[in-house]
Every structure is written in C-alpha cells, then in structure tokens.
Amino acid sequence: MLAVPFPSNADTITVCDITHLSIIQLQGPQAKAFLQGQLTCNVMTLAEQQWCWGAHCDPTGKMNSAFRLYQDNDETLMLILPTTLIEHQIAQLQKYAVFHQVTITQAPFNLIGLIGTDLLPWLQQQGLHASQPGLYSLPQDEAYVLIDNPHQALLITLSKTQPSWLPEPSTRQPGYLWQQQDILQAYPYFEAAHVQKFIPQMLNLHAINGISFDKGCYIGQETIARLKYRGGLKRALYVLAGSATQPVAIGDQVAWQLETGLKKVGEVLQVVQHEQVCILTCVMNNTLAADATFKLVADELSHLTVQARPYTIPT
C-alpha cells in the first residue's frame, strides 16, 4: 500500500479549507467566445453541470496555467487554478480581451475540499442529487459542488454564509490534504516558478480531456497540434512518492538513480510532505522504466519511486 504523508480515514468525510487554489471569473456577453480563442479545451461544448481541464498558453505553446474550468451561465465562466498564478494569468488574458465584451477578475468565492470513500452517498444525504462527476448547483446554499471523482469534490460557496451541513471551521483540515489528492490523481497543476516552461502534453492534459484538437484556432495551437500530429513528445508528468530527510520545495531537482551516479531528470512541480514521507509531481522523460528509482539532488538519503497514474497516456 502506498505510504502518503497524510493517510485518509476511510470511515469519515474530510473537509478542507483551501487557500492554495483561487478562482478567476470571466463575465460578459462575449466571455465564452473569447475563451474559445484562448484555451486548449473546447469552451463552446461545455454544458451546464459540466466542467473540464484546460490550459492557457503563450504563442509558443508554453503554459501560463492549467485549471479546472466550469460554466456558471452563458455569460459567466470560472477558472480554478493555483493562487500563485492568479495575477499572471489575469494579466495574460487581459492582453487579448481589449476588443471583447468581457471582464476578468479574481472571484471572491470560498473553496472547500471534500474527500472520502463514501463521498457521493454523503453528498446525497445533504440533498445533492449527484451520482457521477460533474458540476451541481445548490441554490439554497448559494454554492456549487464540483465533483472531480467519486472520492473528491470541491464546494464553491458564493457568499460568506456557508451551508449548515458543513462542520465548523475549527474542525476542518488544512488544504494540503486536498492537494495530496490532486497529486495522487496526477493532475497538471503547477506554480509560478514554472510559468511558460511546459507544453500542455508534457503535463498530460491530452490524457484528461484538457486539449481539443478539432476546435479551431487558439493561442499556442500550432505548437500543440504539431506535437500531436508529427510526434516528438518526449516528456510526461509523473507522480513520485517515498522518503525525504530534508524539506522538499517546488523547483527542487529530481535525479534518476543510476549505478554510476545521479542524472538530473526534472523539477518538483507540486509536493506534499509530512515528516519523512513525501509525494510529488515531476515532468520527466517518458521512456524511463517503471521500476526506476529517484532521489532529490539536495537530499542524499531520499528515495522516490514512480506511482501509477489513474489514467492512460494516448499514444
């Protein structure tokens, strides 16, 4: 069984206050059309009670951010992304928004993570008629529930008043418990240190329906399409887990353990650590053997192995 920094209690629902993620709101009669020409995902096919992964790139195809996207209504869409990217991402979108009827702001909503083996039945007990991943409205609570998978959901509260069925804030858990789940799912989040460093396929967005290859033009499309149709993708996002005797930080170097020494292969994108147990994401060469072992360059006693992703990478 995989050792994680914070093992979950299978018999309870864990409720987390999330501050490491924030929301960008795009609002206006041209919001949807504007984003269609900006993002890797197909915004025009996004329906109510749906959400998807996506990315926004620079003209060379390098990512400004990866995010969860959902539609509030025909004129309001939301991007959920790391808080460290909010200022940069708003500025990048505003560069292209000057000729569109759309406003771009950071939304003042609260994010609360819900984790548990019996999450869906528990949500149904709270009055949410949800049986599968999707976006569900709780109008009586001025909130949405974005169900990511059967064991993980985001509660998005639109007002300071929170649903009465939530536990008191003093009993909630920190957001890194939710971040640990995102890492286990091999999701493509990264922080400000890695802005414009990766093409979306390097973070596996094509494997989680975060790229549409038939939607038409958008920023960075030429590079992304060339990588698909001409080949040449040599890197992918991996999940590594194991032990570390020193604090692990975003940007730390990861190395492949060879008989002759260490070979640097990537940097830490996301990490959760407790004592000497850590789990992280890293972009590495996609031909590395599944049983390869790794170390953190700054921690000689560290030991990391590759963990299985919950999805397959298209060939």
Image (cartoon, rainbow, N blue to C red):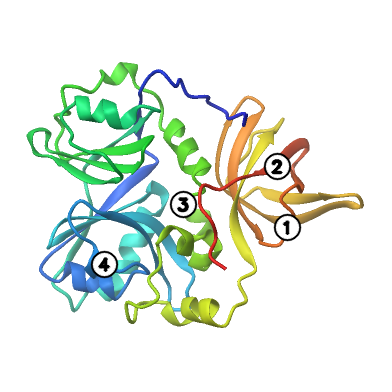
Q: Residue furthest front?
A: 131
First-in-chain label (4 vs 2): 4
First-in-chain label (3 vs 1): 3
Q: Is residue 197 visible?
A: no
Write the residue at 31% across / 61% down. 90
Disc 4 element: helix
Q: Nearer the viewer, residue 154 or 309?
A: 309
Mark 3 is on which residue type? Tyr
User: Residue at label 1?
Assistant: 288
Disc 3 element: loop
Mark 4 is on which residue type? Val
In the rendered view, would you say 159 is above or below 55?
above
Task: Measure the C-alpha gap from mark 3 to mark 1.
Answer: 22 Å
Write the residue at 28% across / 49% down. 23
First-in-chain label (2 vs 1): 1
Residue 43's mark?
A: 4
Q: Nearer the viewer, residue 194 or 50?
A: 50
Write the residue at 53% across / 65% down. 314
User: Residue at label 2?
Assistant: 305
First-in-chain label (3 vs 2): 3
Q: From the viewer's perspective, is 14 left or right of 228?
A: left
Mark 1 is on which residue type? Leu
Specify few, some or many for label 4: CA neighbours under 10 Å numbering under 14, 14-19, or 20 or more.
Answer: many
- List x then y, in percent, for residue 183: 51, 43
Task: Measure the C-alpha gap from mark 3 to mark 2.
Answer: 20 Å
Mark 2 is on which residue type? Thr
Task: Measure the C-alpha gap from mark 4 to mark 2.
Answer: 37 Å
In the rendered view, would you say 100 is above or below 269?
below
Specify few, some or many for label 1: CA neighbours under 10 Å numbering under 14, 14-19, or 20 or more.
Answer: few
Residue 189's mark?
A: 3
